[in-house]
Amino acid sequence: MMSTHARARVGSGVVLAVLIAACSTTMTGRRQLTLIDDEKMDALGVAAFTDIKQQGKVEKDRRPNTYVRCVADPILAVIPKGGAAPKDGRWEVIVFDDSTPNAFALPGGKIGVHTGMLAVATTQGQLAAVIGHEIGHVLLRHGNERMSQSIVAQSAMDAGSVALSQTRPEYRDAVVGGLGVGAQYGVLLPFSRKHESEADVVGQRFMAQAGFNPAEAIALWKKMAKLSQGTQPPEWMSTHPANETRIENLEANLPQTRELYLGARARGKRPNCVPPPVPSGN
């Protein structure tokens, strides 16, 4: 019979082998741990989004829906296919009647934008920066990485498997938390600064390739920084920390993304999305 020490060594070796096998590389070249299959992540994202739509208030006004879709579609047309993108290439874009300035994207091709975000990201380019950033989180598998790190931290692969079961409601909070959505849907949970910086750079690239001026991403975060001075920062900003470092990173990335933008414009990619009137309640 194998001793406890020997079993521990074997167990550690199995876990190490799993971790090595589960390493992947992001489109930025960074190595990451992704223990969860993309199809499983898609299923989790779809389930969480269904709950959000049931618990939230979907905006019925056609104008903000048309506008957000107008901004999202050019970005969705240029993002890489395959990988963590939905297998059928289709994305659902929903506007929620909520004054909090939030936006999010989930695996499985789900994007949500609150009407309150339209009062902060007031131009098509600024909204493109927001949407590109959130899509970046999905394509960079940040939710998968965060959930995988949580599983490893628990040092129990079987516990992680249980936590991923959609049929066990007692584990749902852990699942949606890994996706970046709080137990009270509509509350977004922060990704790490590393994830935020990575999504910033990738999102700026996406918006430029779609024909949106990448300088608008810098303008958005400068606006966020100004709004936060001496006051409680907007909710979306508090979960996506705006600071001088991220603005500097976007500025450093501007020469490259500006070339992408000029090339996209030369090829006829010229989005013309007109913002709707912002409701007086926002």
Image (cartoon, rainbow, N blue to C red):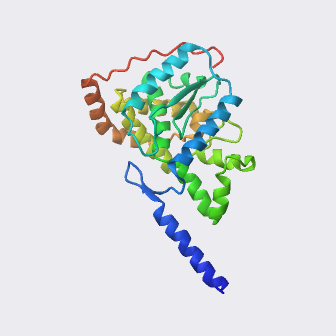
Residue 177 in view in this figure: yes
Where in the figure is residue 57, as x and y percent of width and height? 68, 24
Q: Quadrant of residue 52?
A: top right
Residue at 71%, 38% in the rendered image = 184
Question: As displayed, is residue 162 above or below residue 114?
Answer: below
Provide residue 198's location: percent of width, then percent of height.
44, 46
Quarter of the N terminus within the rendering = bottom right
The percent coordinates of residue 271 (x first, y second) are: 37, 20
The number of numbered badges drawn on the structure is 0
Which residue is located at x 66 percent, y 17 percent? 281
Q: Nearer the viewer, residue 23 or 199?
A: 23
Q: Tell me, yes or no, if residue 245 can be seen here.
A: no
Along the line of sight, which residue is nearer the eye, 54 or 64?
A: 54
At x 64%, y 39%, the residue is 48
In the picture, residue 156 is in which quadrant?
bottom right
Outermost residue, right side: 170
Residue 36 coordinates in the image, percent (x, y): 54, 54
Q: Quadrant of the C terminus?
A: top right
Q: Is residue 18 above or below residue 10?
A: above
Q: In the image shown, does 170 or 202 lie closer to the viewer?
A: 170
Using the image as rendered, state which of residue 276 and residue 45 is in the foreground: 45
